[in-house]
Amino acid sequence: MFRRLIPPMCIVLSVLVATTSTPLMAAPGDVKTSFNAPGRYPSGLASDGKHLFVADWRDAQIFKLNPEDGSVLATLSAPTLKPHGLACSDGKLYISDDHTGGVYVLDIESEVVERTFKAPQSRASGLAYADGVLFILAGKKVYRVLPDDGTILGYFETPASRCQCMTHDGKVLWISNRTKDELYMVAPDDGKVLGILKSPGPYPVGVAWLDGHLWNVDFQTRRLYQLVVQDDLMYSLSETRRARVEYLWALTNYGPGEVQNLILNVAVPMELPNQKVGAFQYVDSSTSDEGVSFTRNEVSDQWGQACKQWKAGRVAAGVKAMVSYSVEAEVSAIRYLIIPEKVGSLKDIPPDIRERYTADASRYRFNTPYMKKTVKKIVGDEQNAYWIARKIYDFVIDSLEYEMVGGWDVPEVVLKRGSGSCSEYTYTFVALCRAAGVPAGYQGSIVVRGDDACIDEAFHRWAIIYLPNYGWIPVDANRGDAKSPADQARGFGGLSNRFLITTQGGGDSEYLAWSYNSFAKYAMIGFCKVEEDNFGLWEPLSPTTQPARKSEGGASCAKPGER
């Protein structure tokens, strides 16, 4: 029998502390509603499709809540001293003890424990139920068991260490991580992490699914949160960084001959969902009294990438020519939450995008017998654009190891060698996606290296792919080449706030060729020892930062190095 836990006046107060904070354009992970948890030590969370059930770990109680306002409708005593995991199905509550590993099946109406069995491990902190299968999160594994007696049907590794709880939304699992403060969308058959949300509190200890929303209870804040999973925005932004970024290119002619017909094209960073840029200041100069006479122009390549172009007729022996720009920018971490079944098939891709971004090119070369066979092996008969790209992504991170071996070799060479730089990871992923019919290109950037104020001499490149109903999303197979399923997922649909994106295109640019940030070409008369250099400088902005000195001039480029 249910018993009242708190008097009516307290229930009214619990309604008053509920808050609604959904923005007009809701992003994945935004809090729609929040209210206080009924106990001081919340742990597990579950739903019967109408109500929420939250366990109190210390007091061994389970509260039945009205999800509209958090009011407590009833309470019952837990059948174990340390209730943690909760799941609900057909009028039964499944309750796990994270100390003893006991699992208890409780009839909600009668409060009778109908059966009990041991979890595969003692630290059974999370439970979920779906389609006649009970999922048990214990230690570093998620087990699929028979709900009658705990017979193991299979298992997979948790997305990361210190995972805490889970729920099933009818298609996928949601698993929380208490140290990274994250919520993972996980394939229930093999544990592949499909998406990542930031938890609203610092200690996500319980999750549940109700009416198309993910619910989370936090042990530290002692609040319940109703989270948006699908709404107007396909992505969330966080951790905005304000900085002044300078990019410098230089060419030194040590002679004794002369450099002639120098053409330098510098990619101009653009406005993007995760990036805002202010006014640019350009400078061009030289280290000699003889000087370098620059002319400046604005051009745009076939991919729509804007460039500043500098031309100089000659750079004499002993002269160093320099070009730079600086810009104040805001860059944010971006994370798409992609629901695979919401992604259309290849037939849903706009024809103009398909034609331009699935074409072969000199550094892709995917029409060879080896590449065709590889693509067929990876993709099979899959038609969903997300799963095609995800299979290719998983193949690339399984097949390659990061190594700077010099140059940017074509994907077939890279795959046979088994290693590559970030650009080679990118070319390989892009080539395989294009061969499979998924439009793909790339972005290039200047990178924060460690401290907020830093120098970048390596830069970074990653892929972008077009998914129906989502548009262009970033995919960094180099970043995703990690051990844990959660870290592998970070490269698919997400970027950190460490990048000023300078370049976006599909390759073989008429102004940037296969480079990014900048590209220079020139002729030499006689023997010349020529050295090109380029790097980026980050300076964090604060309210006391002085504005940049206004200058006139230009910018430049060389083939970037990589890490």
Image (cartoon, grey):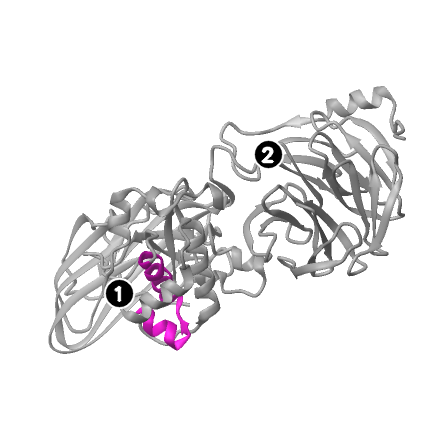
Residue pointed to by mark 2: 212
Foreground residue, 128 or 288?
128
Residue pointed to by mark 1: 367
Kindly indicate the quadrant of the structure image that contains residue 447.
bottom left
Q: Around disc 2, counting alpha carbons within 10 Å, would you say few (fewer than 14), some (14 to 19), or many (20 or more)?
A: few
Q: Is residue 429 magenta?
A: yes
The region drawn magenta spans 410-435
Which of the numbered marks, if any, corresponds to residue 11? none
Mark 1 → mark 2, Cα distance in angstroms: 44 Å
Left-right relation of 17 to 538 = right
**Looking at the image, residue 510 lies above or below residue 54:** below
Q: Earlier in the sequence, mark 1 or mark 2?
A: 2
Magenta residues: mostly which secondary structure?
helix
Foreground residue, 367 or 39?
367
Q: Please state which amino acid type lies under the numbered disc 1.
A: Asn
Residue at the image point whose x is 84% and y is 29% from the top: 74
Residue at the image point whose x is 84% and y is 41% from the top: 106
Q: In the rendering, at what x and y percent does residue 220 appear?
A: 75, 43
Q: Around disc 1, counting alpha carbons within 10 Å, would you say few (fewer than 14), some (14 to 19), or many (20 or more)?
A: few
On the question of residue 69 being in view, the answer is yes
Kindly indicate the quadrant of the structure image that contains residue 351.
top left
Q: Secondary structure at mark 2?
A: loop
Q: Is residue 110 magenta?
A: no
On the question of residue 203 being in view, the answer is no
Residue at the image point whose x is 64% and y is 53% from the top: 180
